[in-house]
Image (spheres, rainbow, N blue to C red):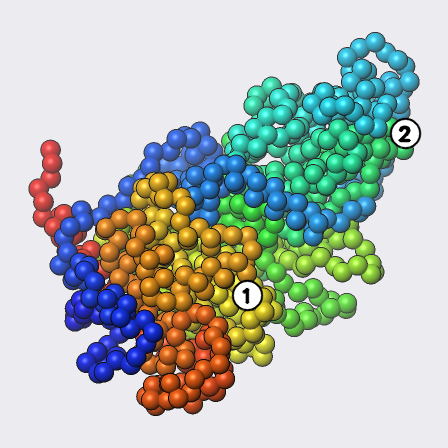
């Protein structure tokens, strides 16, 4: 590849511009000239200041946790496990490791999560629901058994409460069930734990009687023992914010006689072992705060239990108990079960009996993700459309975990292809091509029509990720320049598994939670999602694992080259360029390659409604301005994704391109770029308009605050992209900047308009983004040219350093 001219005196490397022509007058012309003349290292491929690139992996401070996530891998797995272990640690939800939380103190994170949870309670809570129906027995024999067991356990409970026995268990039960409100919260913990312990023990006794009476021929599995950990008001292992929980429940196994196994209950709780969370308040009026706390806890449950589909919880406010189910979009809460009253205790006991006997999927677990004896992910099933069935893959490690309370709960698993699912333990090497990535997420879809014959057409149907990925693979087939630079679908679709009745069902919102809402209810039905799983290649690592700026430049250039090809050849717009959706992989020649992933927000631009956006898509700190502003009706173009790329690069340049460099960010917490993390999208948009409106404000606020002098090449690239997008010389001054301006003076720009692409635009069209959107194709071509030229220089620097490293004698 030839080395392009080194335009060191130019702010932009776009060759289409006539550098020698007379410049048009511009309000910031003096500053622009200064920026283009300012001192910075020559952008040459001969730079040798940086050491030879090598990946540096932080030691795993939690080796036990790492073992649980990765499992006991041998032989050919070692090189992959070494890479993925670091990737997983960096993807865990943590106030110190997450890019989203950089610059925030632990208290700030907690306060933000509490405010978020309160807002979500107001929006997503649906009370007085038939939550018990989720654990309803699925066959007649189990209905009879659970009804009989619940009746007997209730009788035993009422008998004890009426007996006035002089023992600790009676004292605990009596204190909780004899008054509505209590003076303090903490004394209630042993009372509630005693209630669960009593009911669990009695269920075991009743099951043993049934087991003896039928001589083990009932065909009904042993009930799980729902018991509380002995330690209450504790910060469990696996928490990312050290928030204390009140009471945690664990599902212990029973022996054949029905006796519960109390092992591990005395140990400190770990979120991996928690089956449900109990939030306690001493007053019946504190329900809202209790719901909000359950939301906060759910984040850690999803992050630590990779086979969790939804989360169970209980709110205990005085004597009022509600069972809650937290899904991707809602909080379903049961009617109040008042333990001060016989009816309330009866309903509560019946629910606990059903939860003890129900199937694993009814408790929120995914049976198509199976664990080994150590509790690690062992196998995961994916739908194979050719075989028309779910097929298993051997899981090597997790590469991305769910970190949010609501939403898609996206997880990624590194797996072995089916042909090599059982690797030879004696093999000393294994090709990266043997690995695939399986993405599992609750994606939006559409409900079937009433007769079930066909899907109704909708926005979400056109955004089906599997369908779009198949189109992309077909559209880019044979284009070698982008091969390996975007995720390719092997196969995948909706998850299916047996849910009772002898057949299989699609796992979606209606089949999983339909029991808690009536189909003929006047209330709007919940958002419809499907449990979707996709098997893809190639496997790659997060962008913030790059070793240096050159690798970063190469990776993002590859991503945007693929992005452009997908748009032009397939007419699909990605719409979510963010730090998490641009990955990289190591190539055989010692360099790296970028990979564009996650087409969940992508859209077919041939669809009739693609030009306007009733919804926001993307990741908040990297969202483009028009996407952030709810009132904007400017059509969506590829320029929006290029704008998002600029924000990603600004973020990395300011906070560090990798974790090692990011340590220096701790001394620069109070930066203007932190305003991009604000919860209010409109305020984020306002901040970005202000910062990006002129080259002066952009330089002072962002570019000069890049962390290290070694980032000069990254800073230069960002400048070029910024000027090409917001101050493109092919457009008049009417289309420059980011601020919405007042009435233009046509005479002032009359000469300027004669030579510009936008010379025929309506002079009254004052939205700068709308003006630029008309010339998106030309501007996007300029932007691609800028980044490809910089990639060429970066590759030459990488190759030169690799050659120098190989020529150095080995150190003995």
Q: Is 508 displayed left or right of 401 in the figure?
A: right
Q: Position of residue 316 (x, y in %)?
A: 75, 32
Q: Can residue 33 be seen by looking at this rendering?
A: yes
Q: Which residue is mark 1?
A: 629
Secondary structure under badge 1? loop
Q: Which residue is mark 2?
A: 342
Nearest the eye: 183 or 175: 183
Q: Position of residue 266 (x, y in %)?
A: 60, 19
Q: Can residue 468 be seen by looking at this rendering?
A: no
Q: Residue at x 47, y 53 (%)?
A: 675
> How would you rate the neighbour count of disc 1 (Cα within 10 Å): few for under 14, some for 14-19, many for 20 or more?
some
Q: Earlier in the sequence, mark 2 or mark 1?
A: 2
Q: Which mark is residue 162?
A: none
Nearest the eye: 674 or 588: 674
Q: Position of residue 681 (x, y in %)?
A: 54, 58
Q: Residue at x 68, y 55 (%)?
A: 509
Q: Residue at x 20, y 66 (%)?
A: 37
Quadrant, the N terminus: bottom left
């Amino acid at each position: 590849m030839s080395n392009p001219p080194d335009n060191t005196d130019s702010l932009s490397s776009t060759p289409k511009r006539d550098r020698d022509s007379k410049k048009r007058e511009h309000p910031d012309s003096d500053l622009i000239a200064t920026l283009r003349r300012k001192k910075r290292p020559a952008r040459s491929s001969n730079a040798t200041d940086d050491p030879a690139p090598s990946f540096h992996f932080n030691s795993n401070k939690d080796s036990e946790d790492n073992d649980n996530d990765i499992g006991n891998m041998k032989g050919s797995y070692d090189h992959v496990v070494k890479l993925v272990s670091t990737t997983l640690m960096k993807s865990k939800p943590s106030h110190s490791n997450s890019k989203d939380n950089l610059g925030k103190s632990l208290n700030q994170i907690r306060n933000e999560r509490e405010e978020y949870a309160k807002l979500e309670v107001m929006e997503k809570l649906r009370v007085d629901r038939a939550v018990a129906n989720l654990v309803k027995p699925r066959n007649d024999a189990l209905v009879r058994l659970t009804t009989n067991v619940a009746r007997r356990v209730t009788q035993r409970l009422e008998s004890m409460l009426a007996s006035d026995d002089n023992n600790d268990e009676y004292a605990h039960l009596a204190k909780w069930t004899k008054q509505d409100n209590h003076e303090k919260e903490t004394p209630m913990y042993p009372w509630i734990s005693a209630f669960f312990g009593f009911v669990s023990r009695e269920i075991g006794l009743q099951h043993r009687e049934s087991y003896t009476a039928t001589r083990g021929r009932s065909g009904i599995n042993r009930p799980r023992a729902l018991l509380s950990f002995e330690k209450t008001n504790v910060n469990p292992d696996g928490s990312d914010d050290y928030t204390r929980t009140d009471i945690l429940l664990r599902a212990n196994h029973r022996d054949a006689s029905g006796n519960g196994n109390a092992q591990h209950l005395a140990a400190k709780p770990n979120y991996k072992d928690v089956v449900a969370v109990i939030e306690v308040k001493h007053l019946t009026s504190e329900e809202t705060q209790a719901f909000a706390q359950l939301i906060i806890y759910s984040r850690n449950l999803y992050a630590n239990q990779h086979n969790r589909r939804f989360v169970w919880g209980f709110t205990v406010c005085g004597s009022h108990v509600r069972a809650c189910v937290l899904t991707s979009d809602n909080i379903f809460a049961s009617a109040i079960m008042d333990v001060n009253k016989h009816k309330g205790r009866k309903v509560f006991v019946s629910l606990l009996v059903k939860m003890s006997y129900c199937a694993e999927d009814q408790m929120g677990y995914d049976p198509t993700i199976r664990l080994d004896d150590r509790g690690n992910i062992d196998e995961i099933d994916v739908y194979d459309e050719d075989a028309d069935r779910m097929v298993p893959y051997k899981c090597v490690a997790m590469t991305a975990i769910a970190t949010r309370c609501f939403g898609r709960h996206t997880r990624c698993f590194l797996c072995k292809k089916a042909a090599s699912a059982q690797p030879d333990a004696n093999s000393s090497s294994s090709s990266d091509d043997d690995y695939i990535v399986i993405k599992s997420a609750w994606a939006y879809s559409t409900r079937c029509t009433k007769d079930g014959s066909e899907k109704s057409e909708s926005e979400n149907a056109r955004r089906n990720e599997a369908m779009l990925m198949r189109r992309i693979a077909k559209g880019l087939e044979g284009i070698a320049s982008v091969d390996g630079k975007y995720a390719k679908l092997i196969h995948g679709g909706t998850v299916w598994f047996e849910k009772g009745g002898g057949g299989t069902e699609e796992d979606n919102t209606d089949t999983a939670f339909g029991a808690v809402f009536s189909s003929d209810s006047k209330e709007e039905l919940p958002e419809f999602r499907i449990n979707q799983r996709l098997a893809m290649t190639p496997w790659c690592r997060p962008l913030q694992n790059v070793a240096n700026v050159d690798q970063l430049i190469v990776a993002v250039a590859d991503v945007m080259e693929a992005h452009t090809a997908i748009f032009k050849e397939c007419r699909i717009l990605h719409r979510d360029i963010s730090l998490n959706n641009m990955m990289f992989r190591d190539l055989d020649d010692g360099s790296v390659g970028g990979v564009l992933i996650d087409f969940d927000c992508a859209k077919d631009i041939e669809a009739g409604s693609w030009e306007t956006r009733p919804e926001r898509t993307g990741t908040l700190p990297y969202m483009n301005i028009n996407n952030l502003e709810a009132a904007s009706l400017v059509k969506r173009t590829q320029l929006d994704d290029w704008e998002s790329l600029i924000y990603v690069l600004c973020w990395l340049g300011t906070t560090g391109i990798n974790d090692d460099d990011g340590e220096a960010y701790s001394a620069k917490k109070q930066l203007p770029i932190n305003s991009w993390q604000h919860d209010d999208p409109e305020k984020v948009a306002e901040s970005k308009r202000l910062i990006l409106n002129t080259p002066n404000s952009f330089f002072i606020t962002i570019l000069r605050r890049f962390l290290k002098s070694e980032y000069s090449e990254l800073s230069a690239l960002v400048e070029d992209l910024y000027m090409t997008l917001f101050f493109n010389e092919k457009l008049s001054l009417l289309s420059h900047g980011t601020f919405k301006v007042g009435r233009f003076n046509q005479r002032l720009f009359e000469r300027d308009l004669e030579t510009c692409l936008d010379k025929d635009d309506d002079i009254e069209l004052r939205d700068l983004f709308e003006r630029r959107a008309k010339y998106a194709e030309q501007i996007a071509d300029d932007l691609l040219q800028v980044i490809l030229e910089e990639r060429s220089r970066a590759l030459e620097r990488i190759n030169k350093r690799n050659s120098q490293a190989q020529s150095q004698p080995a150190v003995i």
